[in-house]
Amino acid sequence: MEAVQDQLTGGLKHLRSFKIEQGPGLLRFIAICAGLASFVCAVYEMTGIMSALSHPVQYILYVYICLFAFTTMLFEAKQEWFEKDGSLKLLGDYQEKLIKHCEFMTLMGGRGLFYIFQATLWLTFADSLGEILEIAAACALAFVGILHLFAHWGIMPNHMAERMIATAEKMTGQDLNQNGTVGE
């Protein structure tokens, strides 16, 4: 019995030490903004009591989208915020459960696919251009999801720009970015 408890304690320590792969600050900020926009949009869509009665399945989907948007913001926030005791400890506990049961959320590629999934959920509500809020939320989440996939594979806009400048420097023989070297 004591051996099982030691294994569980060791497993919990391993779980808490597991790091969440995070991208550059700007990408995390954009993802938090997209998650916040999705959350606000879903809450706005849920404000009509009549829609809850006439379309209960749609209302339930909005609740799911709120939860997913909240999870988006949680995984993109600084992890140090949730490690301390206090009011944010409950959020840290929720995040630990997700890490344990949805390990793909710890990888940028996994979160990228999750964000694209959220975008497709929003697109199911957009049957015309009149649903501009749904389309905007879908576009923001899809954009962030694609950027996360690129980051997971090591392709970021700044890397592409650096490669293009290096190639241009090699072709022209000039130091275009003024870093003192040509083509590096």
Image: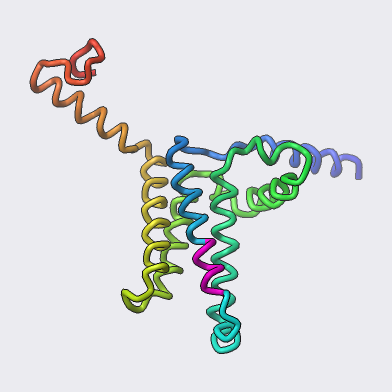
Percent of width and height locating residue 152 = 42, 41
Q: Report the residue that reaches farthest toward the top.
A: 180
Q: Quick check: is 44 in the magenta stretch?
A: yes
Which portion, as a residue range, is magenta? 39-46
Q: Quadrant of residue 101?
A: bottom right
Residue 45 sits above or below residue 31 on the image: below
Percent of width and height locating residue 51 = 55, 84
Give left or right: position of 11 versus 111: right
Kindly identify the residue that appears in the image at 10 percent across and 16 percent down: 173
Kindly identify the residue that appears in the image at 45 percent across and 62 percent down: 117
Residue 96 sits above or below residue 68 on the image: above
Kindly identify the residue that appears in the image at 9 percent across and 22 percent down: 171
Q: Report the residue that reaches farthest toward the right.
A: 1
Main SS, magenta region, reads helix
Percent of width and height locating residue 48 = 56, 80
Q: Quadrant of residue 181?
A: top left
